[in-house]
Amino acid sequence: KVTMLSSVGLSLLVLLSAMEAATVERVEYDYYKYHTMPEINDWMNKVQKDYPDVVTIVEYGQTYEKRVIRLLKVIQLLNCEKKKAIWMDCGIHAREWIAPAFCQYFVRQILQAHKTDPKMQEMIKNMDFYVTPVLNMDGYIYSWKDNTVSTRLWRKNRSPGPPGCDSYGTDLNRNFDANWGTLGVSFNCSSNTYCGSQAVSEPEAQAVTYFVGSRKDDFLCFLTIHSYGQLLLVPYGHPNFTAPNYNELMEVGLGAADAIRSVHGMNYTVGTSPDVLYANSGSSRDWARFQGIPFSYTFELRDNGTFGFQLPEDQIQPTCEEAYSGALHIITYVYNKTFNGAVATAAATLWTMLLTVGVTGTTLM
């Protein structure tokens, strides 16, 4: 009996050791916790290393504090033709930690889908995906500095105010050249919605403006990820302007909200900012639509205010899963319209739901 128990114990020990080794090998990055900027940078490097045939890192600007702004470009490298593209940025507001978490999740999911899913393979063959995990790097790093409310809830970048102002930061999402300085902004440099001394005064806004603007005819879709409020916002933030394809933007947005709801039952409201939130100007979403990029949306992720910008880590997974479903619906619609001549809405919706179900249980890259 002693020998048998010892043998069982040894076998169990060997099994546990093997399981632990497999777990260590698999668990290289936890997508369901918040990560510091150095961790995110390391993750970007590893993704590029792990997927050298699909992922490249592009440097396209500097922050005020001279940090290099980088994005992941997901492409089919063997296809050297100039292609249409999808843009996604996260972390334009420092305190919205769930946004960078989603951008990382989004990249992981499309890379996993690309391995086995013919539709994703087709889309990546014909479109490039540009994903910036953290645009406002200076502000994001500052928001991790300590646990004081003023630091953790920092919104703006970290550029100094104008002469005579002892406050720091400009609201990057009020600094783009889209009805700049007209509504929903402040010219008080200490305000959270300070729009800067002039349109595109900030290096982070300049980086996006130049990079996307110089390729504006290639971009089909511009997605900028924020929190909180559970909203899908369409252009424009100024009530006196209406997007020429407003009805289609709403139709696609409502379809995305349905896709989101199908995952965990969460309701997202769709509309223009003046209709469902507040009027504003100088947003990147509006700028992108003014540039002629036909589909431009702001995602405001969970929640509705219970935790606000301090969304608990146990909500990262469901938030990312549902937002992925919504983003995928928009991207699939845009792809089908561009490359198939007509949109098979029902088929696109079904594929989105099936792909979402297929990846919901996956937690690690």
Image: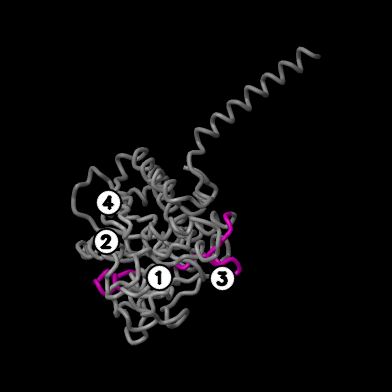
Coordinates of residue 299 in the picture (x, y in percent): 44, 67
Left or right of 57 in this view: 311: right
Residue ID for mark 1: 167
Can residue 273 be seen by looking at this rendering?
A: yes
- In terms of image quadrants, where is residue 246? bottom left
Left or right of 54 in this view: 350: right
In this rendering, the answer to whether 24 lies above or below 335 is above
Residue ID for mark 3: 304
- In terms of image quadrants, where is residue 180? bottom left
Of all residues, the one furthest to the front in this rendering is: 164
The alpha-carbon separation of the residues under discs 3 and 1 comes to 29 Å
**Which mark is first along the chain, 3 or 4?**
4
Q: Nearer the viewer, residue 186 or 17?
A: 186
**Which mark is first along the chain, 4 or 2?**
4
**Residue sitting at 71 percent across and 16 percent down?**
7
Segment tinted magenta in the rendering: 287-313
